Amino acid sequence: MNIHYKKLTENELDIFIEMRVLQLREEGAKEDIDLVPALKDYYNRHMANGTFVSWLALENDKIIGTSGMSFVEKPPYFGCPNGRVGLLSSMYTEPSYRRKGIAKELLTRVINEARLYGCGTVQITASDKGRLLYTDFGFVKHENFMHYKL
C-alpha cells in the first residue's frame, strides 16, 4: 500500500462531494434530494474563507479516504471558553481500505487543523461504524444532543 495524504483543493472537490454523498447514504440517508449543488456551494465558500478544511488519503492519485472540519464560533461556554468549535464531518474510507489506520491518520490531521484554528472543542455526530474510532481517539459521548427540523 502506497498511501499518501494531502489537503483538499478545488481540483478534487467533485470526487470529494461524490464520496460525501456515498457516506451519507451508507449512514442511512434516504431523502431523494440532489445535494451536489448545495455541497459544492458550501465547500467553495468555506474553503475560500478558511472555515472548512479537509485531508484526503490517496493511493496512486485515487482518493480512498476523506475527512472534513468546519470551524464555527458559538457564544463561549464553560466547556469551550473561546467559543471556537470544530465540527467534524465527511469521515469516509473506501470499504476495501478500512481497518488499516487511514481514518485515524485523517482524524489526527483534521484535529490538528482545529487546534491550529484555535478551537477549544471538536464535535461529531458519529455513525455506529465510526463510534469505535472516535472513542479510541478520546472523544466522549454526551447524551443531551437534540435537534429541531425547520
Image: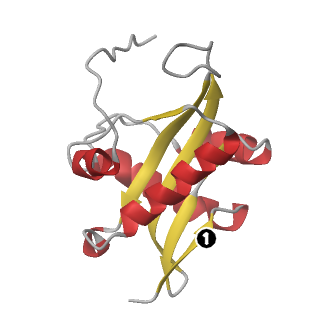
Q: In this rendered view, identify the residue nearer to me: 117 or 39.
A: 117
The residue most toward the right is: 49
Q: Using a 10 Å C-alpha cutoff, classify the residue at mark 1 as few (fewer than 14 neighbours), some (14 to 19) or many (20 or more).
A: few
Q: How many marks?
A: 1
Q: Residue at x 61, y 18 (%)?
A: 74
Side of 110 where 44 appears, left or right: right
* Residue type pointed to by label 1: Lys
Say which quarter of the image contains residue 37.
Answer: top right
Q: Is residue 138 left or right of residue 18?
A: left
Color style of the picture: secondary structure
| Quadrant, the N terminus | bottom left
Q: Residue at x 33, y 70 (%)?
A: 101
**89 or 86, nearer to the observer:** 86
Residue at 25% over, 19% down: 143
What residue is pinned by disc 1? 6
Q: Is residue 108 above or below residue 37?
A: below
Left or right placement of residue 20 versus residue 52 in this view:
left
Compared with 82, 29 (above or below) is below
Q: Secondary structure at mark 1?
A: strand
Q: Is residue 48 above or below residue 86?
A: below
- The x and y percentages for residue 7 are 64, 64
Residue 133 shows up from this direction: yes
Which quarter of the figure has residue 61? bottom right
* Residue at the (74%, 41%) spot, across then down: 45
The answer to whether one can see residue 41 in this image is no
Residue 29 rendering spot, x and y as whole percentages: 30, 38
Q: Nearer the viewer, residue 108 or 59?
A: 108
Could you say which is closer to the camera, residue 124 or residue 136? 136
Which percent across, then down, holds residue 115? 61, 44
Q: Can you tell which quarter of the image residue 54 is in?
A: bottom right
Where's residue 73, x and y in %?
A: 65, 23
